[in-house]
Image (spheres, rainbow, N blue to C red):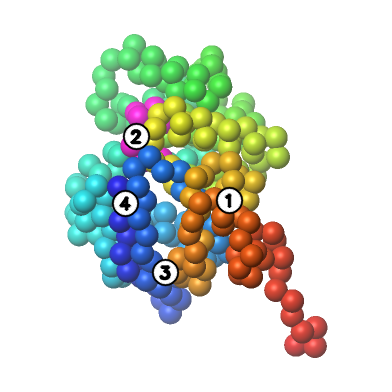
Amino acid sequence: MIEVRDVTKSFGTQQVLRGISLDIHRGEAVVIIGRSGGGKSILLKHLIGLLQPDSGTIRVDGEDITTMNERSLLRVRRKYGMLFQMAALFDSLTVEENVGFVLRRQGVESDAEIRRRVAEALEMVELPGIGHKMPSELSGGMRKRVGLARAIVYRPEIVLYDEPTTGLDPIAADNIDRLIRRVWETLHVTSIAVTHDMKSARTISNRILMLHEGRIYSEGPSAEILESTDPVIHRFVNGISTPRNLNE
């Protein structure tokens, strides 16, 4: 469904992506892990066309999005839903208006149809009956769940998650993981997430890619990566810093 070939990206003198190549198949649940600042979120933005690579190609359903104009990109982006790191809700809109916003942008004119689809999405994230509330009335976990409802309300083919459990307590994070898994299994979407949370990575993925020094260092079934004895992978997955000479 998504083919990335030899993608590079630099910001000034800093080279972030150093020839990324990967395939993501329809219906997969893929998690991308790696060090902070290693390019995970940058890669995610390339997959949806928010950033253009310096070189290389990215194909979505066979179409090269790196050569598209903005109008063509908008058409391709309709395949995607995205849960942003901080949910990115509009503070001046109610929950119902936030979730239904994209439906109005896509030309759904019937208020009754919008209400029905919003209610269905809120039910899926286990927040029925809160459409009248404002974002300021919600906890962090509830805001994330509303963001997830907005991401799936128009039934996208691909859902992207940028650090979905950041800022949440362990119970709220587990709830989000469970809902992401439920969305993947129920709606049969292609799921792509970046995360530092290894518990989350185990729950929401069936395949893991590890980004290291701007390249795909390793990929494989989730259990295989999370239980790897490779020193680089093992240290990252288990949160073990590299020993340093204290005299340096």
Q: Callout 4, which amino acid?
A: Ile
Magenta part mainly helix, strand or loop?
Answer: loop
Give the residue number, with chain letter if any, for mark 3: 17
Q: Identify the element where label 4 is drawn.
A: strand
| Percent x, y of residue 233 | 60, 64
The part of the image, by quadrant, that contains residue 116 is: top left
Cα–Cα span, label 1 and label 2 = 28 Å
Q: Identify the element where label 2 is drawn.
A: loop
Crowd band around label 3 with a 10 angstrom C-alpha radius: few (<14), some (14–19), many (20+):
many
Residue 81 can be seen, yes or no: no
Give the extent of the magenta segment: 152-159
| Percent x, y of residue 10 | 39, 72
Q: Contact, CB < 8 Å: mark 3 with mark 4?
A: no
Which residue does the image show at 19% across and 47% down from the upper left?
A: 72
- Asked if residue 206 lies left or right of residue 190, the reply is right
Cα–Cα span, label 2 and label 3 = 27 Å
| Mark 1 or mark 2, earlier in chain | 2
| Mark 3 or mark 1, earlier in chain | 3
Give the residue number, with chain letter if any, for mark 4: 2
